Image: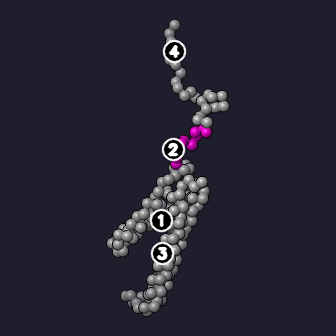
Amino acid sequence: MVRRPVAWVVAVVLFVEGLGVAALQWFLGVVVDRQDMSLAGLDPDVMSMSSKIGGLVFGAYFALCGLVALLVAVRDRAPAGFGRILLISAAVVHGLLGAFAWGLVGWTAFLFMVVVLGLIVLLLMTYDAQGTPTSEEPADAAPDGGKGGDGSPAGGSPVTPPPAPTTP
């Protein structure tokens, strides 16, 4: 049973985004290489190679974030340590890319970045501080409604306060 489908969605979106970013940067590197033009005296081969390498690094970063989301989905536990930091950094990157996309690309790219940002934040907030999925039922609730085997309350604590003492 899949308890938190948002983790699966985030993993798929980050993998696809990583592939898309790497492919786009590779394409831009090929375009710069074929034009054989320089920008402010820079070598076109260096610009082409740096675009390709940057695309591969950025794509690998998103793929690694997707791997963390996939591990969260498989384990059904909150990300901890480096994985949590990686997902938080991906959320910050999407916020910044969304801000730049609004002005440079348009509102559709901005909308995509905000949706991915929202999915990552939702993934991070779906789990509580102990690393367990949040639910309506408390973690210490017994399956028999908190009753012991003899019908008495579990743990020996009374459900209602004892009656007030009477004076004779």
Find the distance from the CA under tag 3 to the CA under tag 2. Answer: 39 Å
Q: Secondary structure at mark 2?
A: loop
Residue at image position (58%, 35%) is 145
Residue 2 spot, x, y in % from top left:
57, 55
Tell which of 147 and 50 is nearer to you. Answer: 147
User: If you read the primary sequence from the N terminus, does the residue marked by circle 3 or circle 2 appear first?
Assistant: 3
Observer-side mark, 1 or 3, equals 3
Label 3: how many Cα within 10 Å (few below 14, some 14–19, many 20+): some
Q: Residue furthest right?
A: 149
Q: Are marks 2 and 1 in contact (CB under 8 Å)?
A: no
Mark 2: amino acid: Glu
Relative height, residue 163 to residue 34 (above, below): above
Distance from disc 2 to disc 4, alpha carbons, whole Å, reads 37 Å
Tell me which secondary structure the magenta stretch mostly adopts. loop
The segment highlighted magenta reads 134-143
Q: Which residue is mark 2?
A: 136
Does 116 appear above or below 160? below
Residue 90 is marked as: 1
* Identity of the residue furthest to the bottom in this view: 36
Residue position for label 4: 165
Question: Measuring 52% from the left and 24% from the top, which residue is drawn there?
Answer: 161
Distance of label 2 from label 1 (alpha carbons): 29 Å
